[in-house]
């Protein structure tokens, strides 16, 4: 058990009155306090409306997990910085790759990509992963701007 926590303090904090139904308790950053975040970390039973709003670092259990998402509207070939586990960006016409700097990306990460624009030229896209960034590479130059969504899953502890 974390320093400063005893079974009595844990149960006392978990028994706080008026905690919203479905809240999942967690140990706060001070490593002592038990806290809840009913908007961003909760269990939602089947058929219940989704609570909270989509924010970076958000994990809402609602028949799945929602994660932070960023939209990048940049349309040139310069690298993008998108520190989010998921997002959407544009690969400009005639460009065959774009680099994304992302603190969630590690050499052991899985980067899932989905092409959102159906245009002539690009059939397949794929990631080239390195520590702290990844490149989205097209099999051919797109004839028009191409929207791509990404989702990063870390399979082990970074550096492990």
Image (cartoon, grey):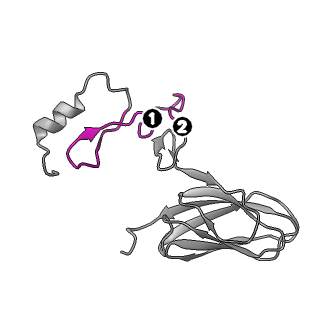
Specify the principal SS of the magenta part.
Answer: loop
In the visual, does 28 lie left or right of 84?
left
In the visual, does 33 lie left or right of 74?
left
> Would you call the spot at circle 2 few (<14 residues within 10 Å), some (14-19), or many (20 or more)?
few
> Would you call the spot at circle 1 few (<14 residues within 10 Å), some (14-19), or many (20 or more)?
some
At x 51%, y 40%, the residue is 63
Quadrant position of residue 115: bottom right
Determine the secondary structure under disc 1: loop
At x 54%, y 28%, the residue is 49
Residues at badges 2 and 1 in contact (C-beta under 8 Å)?
yes
Determine the secondary structure under disc 2: loop
Nearer to the camera, 54 or 78: 78
Give the labeled residue for mark 2: 53
Separation of disc 2 and disc 1 at Cα? 7 Å
Give the labeled residue for mark 1: 39
At x 56%, y 75%, the residue is 129
Quadrant position of residue 158: bottom left
Instruction: Please provide percent x and percent y for residue 42.
Output: 41, 37
Asked whether residue 43 is drawn in magenta, I would say yes
Q: What stretch is highlighted in magenta?
A: 23-52
Instruction: Please provide percent x and percent y for residue 27.
Output: 27, 45
């Amino acid at each position: 058990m974390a320093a400063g926590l005893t079974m009595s303090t844990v149960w006392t904090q978990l028994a706080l009155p008026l905690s919203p139904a479905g809240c999942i308790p967690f140990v706060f950053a001070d490593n002592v306090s038990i806290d809840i975040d009913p908007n961003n970390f909760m269990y939602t039973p089947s058929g219940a409306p989704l609570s909270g709003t989509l924010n970076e670092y958000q994990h809402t259990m609602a028949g799945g997990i929602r994660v932070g998402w960023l939209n990048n509207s940049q349309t040139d070939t310069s690298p993008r910085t998108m520190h989010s586990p998921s997002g959407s960006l544009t690969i400009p016409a005639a460009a065959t790759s774009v680099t994304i700097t992302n603190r969630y990306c590690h050499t052991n990460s899985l980067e899932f990509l989905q092409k959102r624009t159906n245009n002539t030229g690009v059939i397949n896209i794929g990631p080239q992963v390195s520590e702290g960034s990844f490149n989205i590479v097209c099999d051919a130059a797109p004839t028009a701007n191409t929207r791509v969504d990404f989702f990063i899953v870390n399979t082990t502890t970074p550096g492990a």
